[in-house]
């Protein structure tokens, strides 16, 4: 095991997959000569050359569509969209082509592309650089959506996504590229479906994904220390499809659920998890499930306002205390 | 085009005309559902260009007006009609419909329903060809109105900077759905628009299949030689509306008459008769044969084919039993 940063884990995954298969390419804005805004492709341009590590024009829909077209011929593109806010521009090709081409061709054609993009809010990036779009991607059939909460997941999810024959959207986080964590020294492929128990507990389940897993873990520590409440934390690294079984198993055990997301609440991950809880284990519940979400506002530039718009571990603690009346 | 091939090309164009007219009838009879975009009037474009290509070897991609491009690429007309009839035996197993004809075995990479959507896909297919190192090219057919999408500009730019083997064929039928080109587009001659990307281009009469073939030959030679993308504009006209839901009331009768006087099938027929290579009777016989084939073989096959079982509605959404979903075989 080695402690490395998430960007280093991503470089390693790219490098191993490109070495393994000459049809694997990386493409995106500033990913080649510059090495990527978040360094996820650092050094690959020198190693694999400009035919396989491609600096694209700032044409998100165009280069995403180009990657999808190349994938029809067996190329396996890893497309980086520099910020998830720009991925709105590529929605046409992602949704209308990648997600549907297998279906509408009667299974003749597939689009095994990987689209990686950092989302989430960072430090005062303002309304147009703070989108949290995972809920948009997970609402469309034909697309897999995964989201890493650690360098290990970032590495293993990217490797499996490259090999999988479905289009996979990987929702990363602007603030997490320098996060350190253990990544196995040997090659590792992370499953693209399922969930992980990030902390065992018996009293309440906190569901998180990506950055909100860390808020849940901090909140669980505070709840244990100050209130004697032992929270289980479930890491939903796969957002589409969601892990119905994992959700059911944990709620059947704790009988309480709080779902934590960085995004606005409407039509979101938490709403979907709550629906699954309703469908799978309603009669196991001792309390109505609660969601902790951002406010339904565009993200402001002002720091105090930005903080007010977003949830954190304290909001999670407050939600659990309210649920328990303590 | 060799004289020996011309009679066959005439037959293919007449077949295309009759096939599409029969689709119209089937739509009116409600045998075909959804949206239906027909090709009469434009036959010389797809057939002339693909006559110059290596079908089955070169990749072809197009919009939702795709039946004839698929058939000329090698798709079985019976299976195309079965697709329109939403049958399991259809090229896309009844899941696609008129706008989504796919025949990957013949490298017909599909019909797509978003105007301008195939521009970057074609560039990507060309990127795949480049990586594989073969001498195939990708031919992308789209209408003039697609050129007002961002994907037109984004794709031409990328195709040029990466020297991709892609031929863009613009079937300029002068209307984007119901809006005439001069009311929607700042530059009427589409071939001039690509000069901003330093891509060679040409404009040709899209009603004369001999001229289309000649222009396509030149374009394809350029692309196959590794000289990068090429843009060919063909001036043409669709006799019917944009789709079956189009009343077609926006065009002047005089304009329609003018274009029907330059019918691509009739032009080639008359040329062959004048040259003594065809008689009126032979043409009539050819037409009867085609009509019989469409009725007795194609429509019959489609009508008698089974529909896909509704229980299979969940198939083809994702890959089946992909081991990497579980992190591989470990």
Image (cartoon, rainbow, N blue to C red):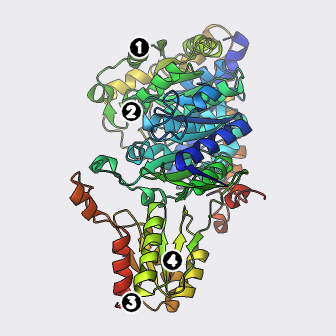
Chain for numbered disc 2: B
Chain for numbered disc 1: B
Chain for numbered disc 3: A
C-alpha gap between disc 3 and disc 1: 69 Å
x then y, percent, for residue B228: 57, 16
x then y, percent, for residue A39: 50, 39
Q: Secondary structure at mark 4?
A: helix
- For the N terminus of chain A, the quadrant is bottom right
C-alpha gap between disc 2 and disc 4: 40 Å
Are the residues flagged by discs 4 and 3 from a single subunit?
yes
x then y, percent, for residue B96: 58, 50
**Crowding at mark 4 (Cα within 10 Å: few <14, some 14-19, many 20+):** some
Q: Residue at x 63, y 14 (%)?
A: B226
Are the residues flagged by discs 3 and 2 from a single subunit?
no
Are the residues flagged by discs 2 and 4 from a single subunit?
no
Marks 4, 3: nearer the viewer: 3
Return the mark for residue A276: 4
Chain for numbered disc 4: A
**Crowding at mark 1 (Cα within 10 Å: few <14, some 14-19, many 20+):** few
x then y, percent, for residue B253: 33, 29
Foreground residue, A109 or B108? A109
Return the mark for residue B150: 2
Q: Residue at x 60, y 18 (%)?
A: B269
Marks 1, 4: nearer the viewer: 4
C-alpha gap between disc 2 and disc 1: 16 Å
Return the mark for residue A324: 3
Foreground residue, B330 or B254? B330
Earlier in the chain: of badge 4 and badge 3, it is 4
Q: Which residue is mark 1?
A: B195
């Amino acid at each position: 095991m080695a402690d490395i940063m998430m960007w280093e884990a991503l470089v390693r995954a790219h490098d191993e997959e490109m070495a393994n298969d000459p049809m694997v390419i990386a493409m995106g804005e500033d990913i080649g000569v510059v090495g990527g805004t978040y360094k996820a492709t650092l050094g690959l341009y020198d190693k694999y050359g400009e035919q396989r590590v491609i600096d694209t024009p700032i044409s998100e829909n165009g280069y995403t569509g180009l990657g999808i077209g190349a994938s029809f011929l067996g190329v396996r593109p890893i497309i980086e969209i520099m910020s998830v806010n720009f991925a709105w521009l590529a929605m046409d090709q992602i949704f209308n082509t990648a997600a549907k081409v297998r279906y509408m061709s009667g299974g003749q054609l597939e689009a095994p592309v990987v689209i990686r993009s950092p989302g989430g809010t960072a430090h005062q990036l303002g309304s147009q650089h703070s989108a949290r779009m995972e809920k948009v991607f997970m609402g469309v059939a034909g697309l897999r959506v995964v989201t890493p909460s650690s360098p290990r997941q970032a590495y293993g999810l990217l490797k499996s996504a490259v090999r999988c024959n479905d289009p996979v959207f990987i929702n990363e986080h602007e603030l997490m590229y320098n996060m350190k964590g253990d990544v196995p020294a040997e090659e590792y492929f992370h499953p693209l479906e399922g969930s992980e128990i990030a902390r065992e507990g018996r009293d309440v389940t906190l569901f998180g994904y990506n950055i909100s897993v860390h808020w849940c873990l901090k909140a669980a520590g505070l709840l244990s220390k100050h209130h004697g409440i032992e929270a289980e934390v479930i890491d939903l690294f796969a957002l589409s499809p969601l892990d119905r079984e994992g959700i059911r198993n944990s709620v059947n055990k704790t009988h309480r659920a709080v779902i934590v997301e960085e995004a606005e609440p409407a039509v979101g991950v938490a709403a979907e998890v709550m629906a699954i809880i309703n469908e799978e284990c309603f009669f196991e519940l001792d309390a109505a499930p609660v969601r902790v979400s951002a406010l339904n506002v565009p993200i402001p530039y002002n720091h105090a306002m930005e903080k007010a718009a977003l949830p954190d571990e304290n909001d999670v603690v407050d939600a659990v205390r309210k649920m328990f009346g303590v | 085009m060799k004289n020996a091939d011309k009679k066959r090309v005439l037959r293919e164009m007449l077949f295309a005309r009759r096939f599409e007219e029969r689709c119209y009838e089937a739509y009116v009879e409600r045998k075909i559902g959804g949206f239906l975009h027909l090709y009469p009037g434009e036959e010389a474009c797809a057939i002339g260009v693909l006559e110059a290509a290596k079908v089955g070897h070169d990749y072809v991609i197009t919009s939702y007006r795709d039946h004839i491009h698929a058939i000329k690429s090698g798709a079985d007309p019976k299976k195309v009609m079965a697709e329109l009839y939403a049958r399991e035996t259809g090229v896309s197993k009844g899941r696609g419909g008129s706008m989504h004809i796919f025949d990957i075995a013949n490298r017909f990479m599909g019909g797509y329903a978003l105007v301008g959507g195939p521009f970057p896909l074609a560039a990507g297919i060309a990127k795949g060809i480049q990586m594989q190192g073969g001498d195939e090219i990708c031919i992308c057919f789209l209408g003039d109105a697609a050129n007002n999408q961002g994907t037109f500009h984004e794709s031409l730019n990328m195709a040029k900077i990466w020297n991709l083997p892609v031929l863009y064929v613009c079937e300029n039928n002068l209307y984007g759905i119901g809006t005439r080109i001069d009311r929607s587009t700042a530059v009427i001659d589409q071939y001039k628009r690509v000069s901003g990307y330093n891509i060679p281009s040409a404009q040709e009469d899209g009603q004369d299949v001999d001229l289309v073939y000649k222009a396509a030959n030149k374009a394809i030679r350029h692309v196959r030689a590794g000289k990068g993308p090429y843009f060919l504009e063909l001036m043409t006209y669709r006799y019917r509306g944009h789709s079956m839901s189009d009343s077609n009331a926006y065009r002047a009768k005089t304009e329609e008459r003018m274009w029907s006087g330059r019918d691509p099938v009739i032009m080639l027929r008359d040329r062959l008769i004048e040259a003594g290579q065809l008689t009126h009777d032979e043409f009539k016989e050819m037409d009867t044969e085609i009509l019989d084939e469409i009725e007795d073989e194609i429509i019959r096959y489609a009508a008698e084919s089974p529909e896909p079982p509704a229980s299979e509605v969940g198939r083809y959404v994702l890959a089946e039993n992909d081991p990497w979903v579980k992190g591989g075989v470990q």
